[in-house]
Amino acid sequence: MANLALYRKYRPKTFAEVIGQEHIVQTLMNAVSHNLLSHAYLFSGPRGSGKTTIARLLAKAVNCQKPKEGEPCNACAFCLELNEGRSMDLVEIDAASNRGIDEMRALKEGIGFLPSRLKYKVFIVDEAHQLTKEASNALLKTLEEPPSHAIFILATTELHKMISTIVSRCQRYDFRRLKVGEIVNRLQSLVKSEKASIEPSALELVALNSGGSLRDAEGLLDKVLTFHSGSGKTKEITVTEMEELLGIVDLSILASFVDLLLEKNTAKTVEYLNSRLEQGMDPYEFAKNLIAYLREALLLKVSPNLKTELLQGFTKEQQERILLQSSKAELQQLQRTVVHFEEAENRMKYASIVQLPLELAIIDSCSQ
């Protein structure tokens, strides 16, 4: 039997285990403990911020036979049924692949049946913004006349694409992007549970490259632990190994590249890029990390005292270097450079020579 991915193996079983969404967790626990439940909830926020996890916890809490202060007991028959994923009364629909009106009609028909065992039949619709107009209208009709035994939880990463009439009929919760420190703490807990050893700075590197998504961070960690265990190594995983395994671009490479770019030395900048690519650097990772680095430099040019979360993950020497770069560059130069490389990243997906858009961005940035 295949090993479970970390995000599934260690998925929170109680609200207390959820990180970074305390404002939402406390409100939902209060609603459960005081029986102030809504028939429909809308969870909006960035990917990997815990929307589906909290939706499943809410489904378990409202059906738990012995809840304590809004928390599921994880011991009763209903909790165990939901934990093991064998309840017919928890229906999960991925709207990204089940967008049509037929699915919504089937959902509407299913709502008419009472729960087979649980108190509430809970419907979780993930990526709800991807429903077609017809499917959205069918869902709206259901939300307008909800049966007392059904609870709907809609999750979306793009709230602006949801039709306003559906949004207005739901109790809305906005999830925030997780902070680097919160992700690192979670990763440290997983590493301890897996009896592995990883340098703290290596975990920070994973967190910084997760884009605020805990699921992505856990995926990166899973990849590293799988490789390390398969290699037979038992020593501590270092930052250097982490960079090599995940293809993460070293900040010193980005800083050196930006130095050449700001000097408008076209030939040396192109040579530097290609030499790194020949050494195995991932061009897509480079583009993504370069844009993030240039953004930091741009923001520091606008406000030298601005301490973003990404910048706080830099060492003192790295912070001093990017501050110096931003002070030397002109605001418009940095602005144009960010735009050029952002456009290059978009074009790379369709380019016959993957680094060509980056080379063109270098020429454009150095010639202005």
Image (cartoon, rainbow, N blue to C red):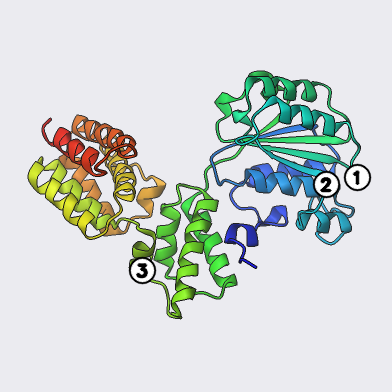
Whichever of labels 1 and 2 marks the residue nearer the N terminus, that label is 2
Q: Residues within 10 Å of mark 3 (few under 14, many from 20)?
A: some
How far across and down, in percent of the image, does residue 89 sit?
Answer: 83, 44
Which residue appears at 67% of the width and 42% of the height?
24
Whichever of labels 3 and 1 marks the residue nearer the N terminus, that label is 1
Secondary structure beneath label 2: loop
Answer with left or right where residue 2 lies relative to residue 56. left
Asked whether residue 10 is in view, the answer is no
Badge 1 vs badge 2, beta-carbon distance below 8 Å: yes
Would you place residue 274 above or below residue 357 in this image? below
Task: Count the marks.
Answer: 3
Q: Please name the residue that numbered disc 1 is placed on.
A: 116
Would you place residue 128 above or below residue 91 in this image? above
Task: Give the Cα distance between marks 1 and 2.
Answer: 7 Å
Which residue appears at 12% of the width and 36% of the height?
366
Nearest to the observer: residue 206 or residue 319: 206
How far across and down, in percent of the image, does residue 33 sit?
Answer: 83, 45
How far across and down, in percent of the image, does residue 97 sit?
Answer: 61, 36
* Amino acid on which the number 1 mark rests in the picture: Ser
Which residue appears at 68% of the width and 23% of the height?
136
Would you place residue 346 above or below residue 76 in this image? above
Q: Which mark is residue 88?
A: 2
* Amino acid on which the number 3 mark rests in the picture: Glu
How far across and down, in percent of the image, does residue 192 sit?
Answer: 56, 72
Which residue appears at 33% of the width and 47% of the height?
284
Q: Nearer the viewer, mark 3 or mark 1?
A: 1
Identify the image quadrant of residue 3.
bottom right
Q: Residues within 10 Å of mark 1 (few under 14, many from 20)?
A: few
Q: Which mark is residue 241?
A: 3
Identify the image quadrant of residue 235.
bottom left
